[in-house]
Image (cartoon, rainbow, N blue to C red):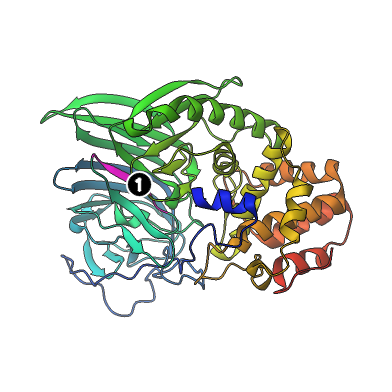
Amino acid sequence: MRFTRQATAALLALLTLPACAPSDGAAATPAASGKGTPAPVADAGAGAPGIGDADFPLDGNGGYDVGHYDVTIGYTPATKHLDGVTTIDATATQPLSRFNLDLRGLEVSEVTVDGAKAGFDRRRDELVITPATALAKGARFTVKVTYAGEPKPVKDPSNLGTYGFIPTTDGAFVASEPSGSKTWFPNNDHPADKATFDFRITVPRGLTALANGELTGKTAAPGGRTTFTWRETHPMVTYLATATLGKFELRQGRTAGGIPNLAAVDPAYHDALGKLYRVSGEVTDYWSKVFGPYPFSATGGVVDNFSAGYALENQTKPMYGGFDPDTSIIAHELAHQWFGDSVSIERWKDLWLNEGFATYAEWLWSEHTGGATAEAMFRRQYAAKNDPIWKYPPGRAKPGDLFNQSVYRRGAMTLQVLRRAVGDETFFKLLRTWVADHKYGNATTPEFIALAERLSGKQLDTLFDAWLFQPSRPEV
């Protein structure tokens, strides 16, 4: 997930500055006016405006499960104008007389459900849709939303900074964690609802559009433009979707293990291209041995010219915002392809399952390459008795401080304590079993604890309680 360039130096130097600024994970936007017939105020057949995450009550939506997104957009950097048509295939999980999608800004001109025009209304970041005919529980249905406007990224300078669809001098940098995908396409914006994706992105000739998965087509479009078609056939959470575009230098090939590998850099980072390509391939192949087979069909990374100060593990296309990433950050973001991308969290409170694991992967990479061992990294961290991480239990990420350093570093320390307790053979079997059992799905902290106890044959409640849930520095 998000990991700042500055944070890497801080981590290795054992400073206590947070690697990622805290965030409340939610963005408030002005109410938007919609067109169509407003939905009734009360309706027993209405889908909930949130998916059920108590910490983020309006993220995602209830009443349906998305199976596939078809996202078609055209973007003109000079005017910052986006035209979009998103088609969503979903299944109703309850009777639905109306339901919501998440969409921030952008003007909707038409909505259809199964080809028939539907009423719609805008309520802040909610697009409330009333189909012409109510949907029965279990019904498969298709929603098509036509929209346009200037995407407005989420700006939260006191926490995560800027995220979502972010205009750049030559295109756009698209990194959406935790809730920024709704800035450029309507969706069910929560990691609990994963789906496959197709992207068709049309840009002025001379620009390149990058999205998740593999490139399936590149064709000329009217008006001196080019359409890039990408397909991600593996389930993906919405915040990992990207449509980054601009001027890029590319290097493509395969890793030594045979996985398609694509590195792309803004021309300002020309010197980073070779290293990004080489290290991404080496890391992907090594994690495939440690964590189990690579879960997706492509790997690589993208360095764009937006100075975000963070990286994000967009599925198959990790993004590095305005800096040349060192090997530890690349190891972190590619470890997320297993921990966070393939195995995704069910609720944001379990974020340590993503960030603690990816941070621990940095320690494993250090071990592998002859640097400090994970045990040495642990001891250095533990020696900082006054570190603020001891007051923040990482097993319960706080909605107002979601990306606290404790979630990363104390989360990683928990894994090293667990490794000590169960031994290397059981520990690495646990990691491989975890990603195999929950491949392409969602998982929770209690499920991880239960698996650790089952495989080790040990009672581990005390260990996990001390390291994940108590606001104090545990005894070693």
Judge by depth and name the residue closer to the eye, 405 or 12: 12
**Is 422 on the left-hand or right-hand side of 139?**
right
> Does the segment drawn in magenta span residue 347?
no
Judge by depth and name the residue closer to the eye, 149 or 39: 149
**Is 157 on the left-hand or right-hand side of 205?**
right
Q: Which residues are magenta?
A: 170-176
Q: Residue at x 31, y 51 (%)?
A: 165
**Is 262 on the left-hand or right-hand side of 424?**
left
Q: Residue at x 34, y 64 (%)?
A: 100
Badge 1 crowding class, 10 Å Cα cut-off, few under 14, some 14 to 19, many 20 or more, is many
Judge by depth and name the residue closer to the eye, 377 or 254: 377
- Residue 451 is at least partly visible in this image: no
- Residue 277 is at least partly visible in this image: yes
Up-down: is 312 above or below 366? below
Up-down: is 155 above or below 237? below
Residue 453, how many percent across, how many down?
Answer: 83, 56
Residue 466, how many percent across, how many down?
Answer: 77, 69
* Residue carrying label 1: 174
Extreme-left residue of the structure? 223
